[in-house]
């Protein structure tokens, strides 16, 4: 029989051991680093499908995996510092959903696994050796945002056949995306007989000023180059396009959901879910070098018919028939 004093001593020893056991259990929980160019306020839409992909792989945040978030809040120059911080913390894998963030992580480490989402060719970006056999510490998803620029411009011309002067809005701080997209747009514009006017904007004030200038110059439409920061300002962009009655074309459906006229691009929810799935597979032991880069195959044309009517535009029936979704 254990005496009362001995029992209390044993109980005290067990209680002292509990925090140690709990700490060991917590330390065993894998940690994912997440780096993004935008703010946390905009991140919820990005994270929902990523968490779904993690769930498909058997991981639930807060239960058997932790996530360390780093938000650049539109300040792309902060990405190298934030990436380096995640590397110092020795997270198990890092996820990104934009080209600038992916390049920042790749520059910060050649060891920690990276699962990226990029709109440009990851081989040309230097993220992987090849699509089928990445060969390094990185793999992920190619959204094809850049490669669709010519297609998107052609659809805009189909919507507004009389258009001749098109403004192209870019974020100059995303130099890689801007350069590659402008080359494609320039080639497509010349083939369509369009005059292109490049407009730079990387802050709220610059976006306001850009639209005021374009309204005075009476451009026929505005074409927004896909960019994480500009996407986070989609409500501002859609509202300004409506206020100044400038037809607008975008690369993501989110713009049309808040009043943008037309979008054509990758279904990003599908692509982001794949990022979460790949991160889960790596946590289970898969190597990034052996996971082929996934190329998006689900593209969608969305037209906001309410906005078209407000602008006095008649959408050609052939274009409506091609649309994956018409918002009324």
Image (cartoon, rainbow, N blue to C red):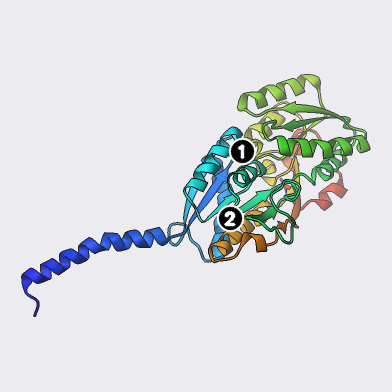
Q: At which x and y percent is residue 60?
A: 48, 61
* Whether residue 153 is visible: yes
Examine the rendered structure and indicate whether residue 302 appears above or below residue 64: above
Q: Is residue 58 left or right of residue 188?
A: left
Along the line of sight, the residue nearer the viewer: 141 or 228: 141
Question: Toward the viewer: 169 or 127?
Answer: 127
Residue at image x 68%, y 41%?
Answer: 255
Task: Give the residue drawn at x 62%, y 28%.
Answer: 203
Lower sequence index among marks 2 and 1: 2
Residue at position x 61%, y 63% in the image: 287
Q: Quadrant of the C terminus?
A: top right
Q: Residue at x 11, y 71 (%)?
A: 7
- Which dot marks residue 113? 2
The crowding category of the residue bearing disc 2, from other C-alpha atoms within 10 Å (few below 14, some 14 to 19, many at least 20), is many
Find numbered disc 1 in the image and state the secondary structure of the residue it sits on.
helix
Asked if residue 297 is positioned above or below residue 213 in the image, the reply reads below
Left or right? Give the position of 116 relative to 158: left
């Amino acid at each position: 029989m254990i005496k009362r004093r001995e029992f209390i001593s044993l109980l005290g020893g067990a209680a002292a051991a509990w925090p140690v056991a709990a700490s060991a259990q917590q330390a065993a929980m894998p940690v994912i680093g997440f780096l993004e160019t935008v703010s946390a306020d905009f991140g919820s839409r990005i994270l929902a499908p990523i968490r779904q992909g993690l769930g498909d792989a058997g991981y639930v945040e807060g239960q058997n995996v932790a996530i360390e978030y780093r938000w650049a809040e539109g300040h792309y120059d902060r990405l190298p510092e934030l990436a380096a911080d995640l590397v110092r913390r020795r997270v198990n894998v890092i996820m990104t959903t934009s080209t600038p963030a992916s390049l920042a992580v790749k520059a910060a480490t050649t060891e920690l696994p990276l699962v990226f989402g990029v709109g440009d060719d990851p081989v040309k970006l230097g993220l992987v050796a090849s699509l089928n056999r990445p060969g390094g510490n990185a793999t992920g998803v190619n959204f094809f945002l850049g490669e669709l620029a010519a297609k998107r411009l052609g659809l805009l011309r189909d919507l507004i056949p009389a258009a001749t002067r098109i403004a192209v809005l870019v974020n100059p701080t995303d130099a890689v995306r801007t350069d590659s997209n402008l080359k494609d747009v320039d080639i497509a514009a010349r083939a369509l007989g369009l005059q292109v006017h490049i407009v730079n904007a990387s802050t709220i004030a610059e976006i306001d000023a850009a639209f005021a200038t374009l309204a005075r110059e009476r451009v026929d439409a505005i074409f927004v180059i896909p960019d994480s920061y500009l996407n986070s300002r989609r409500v501002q962009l859609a509202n300004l396009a409506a206020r100044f009655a400038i037809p607008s074309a975008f690369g993501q459906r989110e713009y049309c959901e808040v009043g943008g006229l037309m979008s054509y691009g990758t279904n990003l929810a599908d692509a982001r879910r794949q990022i979460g799935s790949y991160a889960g597979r790596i946590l289970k032991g898969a190597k990034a070098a052996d996971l082929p880069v996934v190329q998006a195959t689900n593209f969608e044309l969305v037209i906001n018919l309410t906005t078209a009517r407000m602008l006095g535009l008649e959408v050609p029936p052939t274009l409506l028939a091609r649309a994956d979704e018409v918002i009324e």
